[in-house]
Amino acid sequence: MITRQLFETKILIKNGLLKEFPKELLSQRTIIIADHAIKDLYGTSLAAQIDAELLTIPTGEQSKSQTTANDLLEQLFKMQAHRKTTLIAVGGGVTIDLVGFVASIYLRGVPLILIPTSLVAIVDASIGGKTAIDTPFGKNLLGSFYHPKAIITDPSTLATLPEKEWINGLAEILKMALIHDASIWEQKNKKTFSVILQAMQGKIAIVEKDPYDWGLRHILNFGHTIGHALEALSHYTLPHGEAVAIGTVAESYLSMDLGYLQRDMFEKILAAYQFPLQLPKHYSREKILQAMIHDKKRNQVNRFVLIDKIGHAIPFEGAYCRTVTTQELAPTLHWMEANYG
Amino acid sequence: MITRQLFETKILIKNGLLKEFPKELLSQRTIIIADHAIKDLYGTSLAAQIDAELLTIPTGEQSKSQTTANDLLEQLFKMQAHRKTTLIAVGGGVTIDLVGFVASIYLRGVPLILIPTSLVAIVDASIGGKTAIDTPFGKNLLGSFYHPKAIITDPSTLATLPEKEWINGLAEILKMALIHDASIWEQKNKKTFSVILQAMQGKIAIVEKDPYDWGLRHILNFGHTIGHALEALSHYTLPHGEAVAIGTVAESYLSMDLGYLQRDMFEKILAAYQFPLQLPKHYSREKILQAMIHDKKRNQVNRFVLIDKIGHAIPFEGAYCRTVTTQELAPTLHWMEANYG
């Protein structure tokens, strides 16, 4: 068993861990929450193993909504879940973010355990205490900082993962390599445990230094300013990983275009994104600029994380991002449209 | 100026402070939120003084709802409030609790300043980092622990307070005297600054020792198990302070009936509650028992804070509450009905 501690969260990593759930983490009563697909794969058997109740949510990004959050809260009230009832979220990023938010506001917070079962949830969504739901105004706009009691990571669950979910996770792993850890870049084509662990460690190290996202943690948004905007204008039909992959290449281009990154470095980065990537159908220049204005990370000004080499985001005096004008951004959007349009 | 620090919250207390708002607490952009009554009394002039925007909510307990919270969140999105926008809540407990909750989940938390203008908000609701809204399942059932940056207490605002708001606050001050500080009891009939300050200090001292309400902080619920149930069965037409006042006398009776409190002490307590108190119209034995089961503090079992003298809640080995069976509770309900029915 590999263990890590991040603030009050115990992170446990082991193949097969889900079949031998550490019961000492549980309280008097436990409620597992999973989507329909994950319920069949892991939810039902885990509930039997640890004697827990089980709630399900619809599968897909549309569940990360106020409607689903309110449905869950209402069910918890009806079940008379109390302050010592542990909620366990089993699933991908949507379930992790949603259940985390619900756990943080139900009776002002109940104990929470996360079991990420997708690559993106393992290396990204489950780590760092951010919870979120989407609103009609944009993605992740309501949420909280709420640390789970534990994160149970069982990489053997990845065996059941469809290829497109690998790509989702890979986009975050490649991003981590570009902003923080060049050694991940060297192994990027290996679907190995060690790559996953290094990406997790990168996230832990960054969150530890800036838990509330006022400085260093911004670098995790590399590729996400454009990525989130693409997701929004596709009405979330474009998968997060593909959006982030396009965004990461585009923001690497931007880093080059603004003179921070050498062309041969950019070519290396571009070459690594070999999976099929395509701008969403409804893409237009006006729409992406509009969508970026609504992205919460910025304050009516485009701010971008930029890199100066593989493995290093530019500090910009502790801001870890730089204002980019619409004019400065134009060549990047032009290049992106030519490449992925 | 009197100042206190409670975790990250600076508590500033001074007569007239609202007219000389300490601007160094503010960020680039400030939005004041107040109900219609408080807007006219303080909101508009404060907004002009510190160059802030102003949002209003309907007056009354029904604003502590998911509907009003969602309305506020939507307005903040439309105004493009960002992560560094400070929200200032000006008003009584309803506004403080509601705006605190909204500030804690909007973009995962924005800076918050509280300006309590009622006695109950000054001595109780504003201190301790609890935020809350009500749900159809009960009072304060959704919320968070979220510490404001500052609490601006200007006791001169109490001059405009209607008598019934004094009673609301007095109920919490008398409760603080009974559970924690007998010296407050001695001065209880004086509407003085020092009584208010002592009640605030009592709350600060208790919250500091148990911020997340797992032990000592329970004592603040004295009078509230019965009080909340009375409020709920009156559909919140019974004012909080009157409900807590009846609850406090009844739970003092319970402390006596169970053998912890001497009769002459109870008689003293009873004699102090001279203001008119009356059970709500729809009161029945069945309804109050039902309402208590839905109160979140308990887990299908009636737990009560009990006192053994004026100024001292019984620790019960760190639980600071004791299970009371429905049979054990019967004489107290009988007495309460005879006295206040």
Image (cartoon, coloured by chain):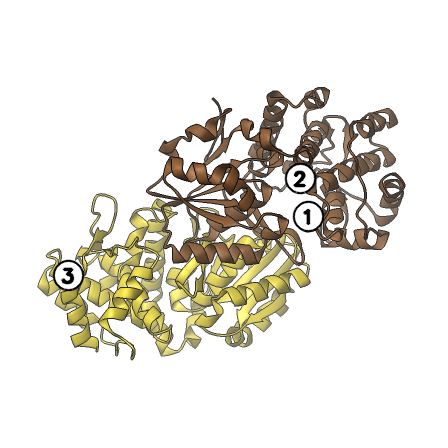
Chain colours: A yellow, B brown
Work out how far the residue at label 3 is from the one at label 1, CA to CA, in angstroms: 57 Å
Q: Which residue is drawn at the image coordinates 21% and 78% (left, top)?
A: A341
Identify the residue position indicated by label 1 in the image. B297
| Residue B64 visible in the current orientation | no
Image quadrant in which you'd find residue A186: bottom left
> Looking at the image, how many numbered discs can be counted on the residues?
3
Q: B159 or A45: nearer the eye?
A: B159
Q: Which residue is drawn at the image coordinates 42% and 31% (left, top)?
A: B21
Q: Measured from the top left, where is residue A33 in percent x and y?
A: 56, 66
Q: Chain of mark 2?
A: B
Q: Chain of mark 1?
A: B
Vertical position of residue B275 compared to residue A298: above or below: above
Work out how far the residue at label 2 is from the one at label 3, CA to CA, in angstroms: 58 Å
Image quadrant in which you'd find residue A130: bottom left
Q: Nearer the viewer, mark 3 or mark 1?
A: 3
Q: Residues within 10 Å of mark 2 (few under 14, many from 20)?
A: many
Identify the residue position indicated by label 2 in the image. B218
Discs 2, 1 touching: Cβ within 8 Å: yes
Vertical position of residue B46 compared to residue A93: above or below: above
Identify the residue position indicated by label 3 in the image. A327
Q: Hey, what amino acid is under mark 3? A: Gln
- Callout 3 secondary element: helix
Q: Hey, what amino acid is under mark 2? A: His
Work out how far the residue at label 2 is from the one at label 1, CA to CA, in angstroms: 9 Å
Q: B147 or B260: nearer the eye?
A: B147
Q: Which residue is drawn at the image coordinates 42% and 43% (left, top)?
A: B111
Q: Which residue is drawn at the image coordinates 55% and 33% (left, top)?
A: B208
